[in-house]
Image (tube, rainbow, N blue to C red):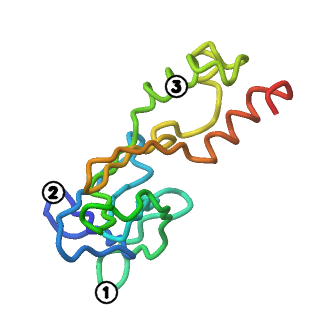
């Protein structure tokens, strides 16, 4: 996966660890820009952390672009009974406003039912919920464990 600058269309960063052989699979940024997500031909959903304080963009050196080898992945589909393939064709981050609304209306965290209280939780909600689709058209929704942990901690001892 290559990140290209909009000024000169030169490669700025290369995110390694994922290849496709037969299908074009799109990648998308989270709302905050902190993560990139993509499906794969290997039944996985892949996430890369973009240039942040933990992983700053470094343009020094001969290559003039950064290479990122680290990524997270999780199994997002099973082998399809009809085609025998396990391809995650699309992956999206659910917008943070929708995530917050779903959490506040779920009743799972009563002390965080008010959006003002939920806004005090220090978590990047733009990457909290992931929606995937596979080659057979099956859609799956995933909640990142770090989000659930942060919500449990912020809601107080009553919800542990």
Spatial CA distance of label 2 from label 1 is: 20 Å
Say whether marks 3 and 1 touch (CB < 8 Å). Answer: no
Residue at the spot of label 3: 100
Which numbered circle lies on residue 7?
2
Position of residue 43 relative to residue 125, above or below, is: below
Location of residue 89 in the rendering, given as x and y in whole percent from the top left corner: 26, 57
Would you call the spot at circle 1 few (<14 residues within 10 Å), some (14-19), or many (20 or more)?
Answer: few
Which numbered circle lies on residue 62?
1
**Numbered circles on residues, count:** 3
Locate the N terminus by quadrant.
bottom left
Which residue reaches farthest right?
157
Location of residue 15 in the rendering, given as x and y in whole percent from the top left corner: 36, 70
Which residue sits at x=32%, y=49%? 133
Position of residue 74 relative to residue 59, above or below, is: above
Spatial CA distance of label 3 from label 1 is: 44 Å
SS at badge 3: helix
Which residue sits at x=41%, y=61%? 78
> Dividing the picture into quarters, in which one does residue 82 lie?
bottom left
The residue closer to the viewer here, 58 or 118, is 118
SS at badge 2: loop
């Amino acid at each position: 996966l290559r990140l290209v600058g909009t000024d000169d269309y030169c490669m700025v960063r290369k995110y390694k660890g994922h290849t496709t052989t037969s299908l074009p699979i799109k990648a998308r940024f989270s709302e905050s820009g902190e993560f990139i997500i993509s499906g794969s031909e290997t039944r996985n959903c892949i996430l890369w952390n973009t240039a942040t304080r933990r992983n700053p963009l470094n343009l020094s050196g001969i290559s003039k672009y950064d290479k990122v080898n680290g990524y997270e992945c999780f199994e997002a589909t099973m082998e399809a009974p009809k085609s025998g393939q396990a391809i995650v064709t699309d992956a999206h981050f659910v917008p943070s406003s929708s995530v917050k609304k779903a959490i506040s209306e779920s009743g799972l965290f009563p002390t965080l039912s008010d959006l003002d209280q939920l806004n005090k939780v220090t978590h990047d909600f733009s990457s909290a919920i992931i929606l995937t689709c596979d080659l057979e058209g099956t859609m799956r929704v995933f909640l990142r464990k770090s989000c659930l942990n942060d919500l449990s901690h912020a809601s107080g001892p009553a919800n542990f």
